[in-house]
Amino acid sequence: MEHLPVDVRASLRFFAFYLANGTLELDLLDGIDYRPRLMAFGSTLEQVFALYANVLCVNEHGEVLNAGDAEYRAAQWIRAHCDPSYEVEPPFAPWETELHGP
């Protein structure tokens, strides 16, 4: 595969837009201005994108199957990062938070 499928690229674009716009999963993150905390250190934002990409499922045709689930899990990580009293349910599995690359 030379490029990511169009559906995957669109899903990533919308995720980045909602994240940067402060409108990611409003039911879970309403009233929490998470953006300054994510931008303070690159590794925090890196973890959010890694979690989103790790949870995202794509079928054999390159169509995204669970963008909403991936967004929600990333939002749960953000909420837990900003609100230590928040308990992630279900807890993150190691594969969800794994960072890939060199």
Image: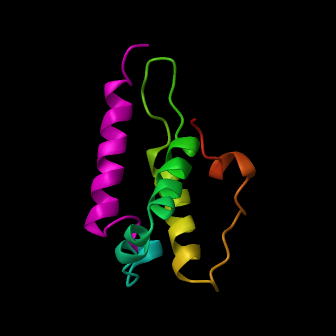
Residue 39 forms part of the magenta stretch: no
Check the image and report above or below for 70 versus 34: above
Using residue 47 as the reference point, say whether residue 93 is left or right of it.
right
Number of dots carrying numbers: 0
Residue at x 59% of width, y 39% of height: 100
Image position, residue 34 (x, y; %)? 40, 75
For the stretch drawn in magenta, the main secondary structure is helix
Image position, residue 72 (x, y; %)? 50, 59
Residue range highlighted in magenta: 1-26
Of all residues, the one furthest to the top in this rendering is: 1
Using residue 34 as the reference point, say whether residue 60 is left or right of it.
right
Q: How is the image coloured?
A: rainbow
- Which image quadrant: the C terminus? top right
Image position, residue 25 (x, y; %)? 41, 66
Of all residues, the one furthest to the front in this rendering is: 102
Q: Quadrant of residue 31?
A: bottom left
Residue 20 forms part of the magenta stretch: yes
Check the image and report above or below for 82 versus 72: below
Residue at x 56% of width, y 83% of height: 83
Image position, residue 58 (x, y; %)? 50, 29
Q: Quadrant of residue 39?
A: bottom left
- Which image quadrant: the N terminus? top left
Q: Nearer the viewer, residue 44 or 67?
A: 44
